[in-house]
Image (tube, rainbow, N blue to C red):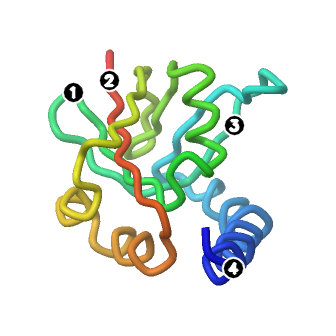
Amino acid sequence: MSRYNELKFRAVTSLQRWVANPLSRQLPFQTLLETTGRKSGQPRRTPLGGSRVGDKFWIVSEYGEKSQYVRNIQANPRVRVRIKGRWHHGTAHLLPEDDARARLRSLPRMNSAAVRAVGTNLLTVRVDLQD
């Protein structure tokens, strides 16, 4: 990762961790991904944008395997997703072979624009929903 991308990663993730995410988690209809912390075993809720298509939920991670929720998925793919205020259980799959830029075109416009603007290593994540 270039020095510029590393600085951008640190600045954006700090802003997300300490300002944007705590505020977003409080919004009742914000989409949330709940993973299990790979070290703590505690539930970790991450606000994000994505799209449900049938029994699949699609996400694009802006930092790929550097994203904490992606690292948690690697340790335990069992997740929950809150969509429109309702929780769904599922299994997450990392899809490095998927064209993440093309996938962003099918996801919510505002979130996709933000992911494209700050992302340095895009990675598609598919959650197979069970309920």
Considering only order in the chain, which callout, 2 or 4, is on the residue closer to the N terminus? 4
Callout 4 touching callout 3 (CB < 8 Å): no
Question: Label 3's element?
Answer: strand
User: Residue 111: where, in percent of width, then height?
Assistant: 39, 69
Label placed on residue 3 = 4
Which of pointers 4 and 2 indicates the residue nearer the eye?
Answer: 4
Considering only order in the chain, which callout, 1 or 4, is on the residue closer to the N terminus? 4
- Mark 1 is on which residue type? Asp
- Per the model, the C-alpha gap separating discs 4 and 2 is 38 Å
User: Residue 37: where, in percent of width, then height?
Assistant: 73, 29
Callout 3 touching callout 2 (CB < 8 Å): no
Which residue is labeled 1 in the image? 55
Callout 4 touching callout 1 (CB < 8 Å): no
Question: Label 1's element?
Answer: loop
- Mark 4 is on which residue type? Arg
Which residue is labeled 2 in the image? 129
- Per the model, the C-alpha gap separating discs 1 and 2 is 5 Å
Q: Is residue 6 above or below residue 121?
A: below
Considering only order in the chain, which callout, 3 or 4, is on the residue closer to the N terminus? 4
Considering only order in the chain, which callout, 3 or 1, is on the residue closer to the N terminus? 3
Residue 110 lies in quadrant: bottom left
User: For the residue carrying disc 3, how many other residues have a C-alpha within 10 Å: few (<14), some (14-19), or many (20+)?
Assistant: some
- Mark 2 is on which residue type? Leu
Considering only order in the chain, which callout, 2 or 3, is on the residue closer to the N terminus? 3
Instruction: Indicate the quadrant containing the C terminus: top left, top right, bottom left or bottom right.
Output: top left
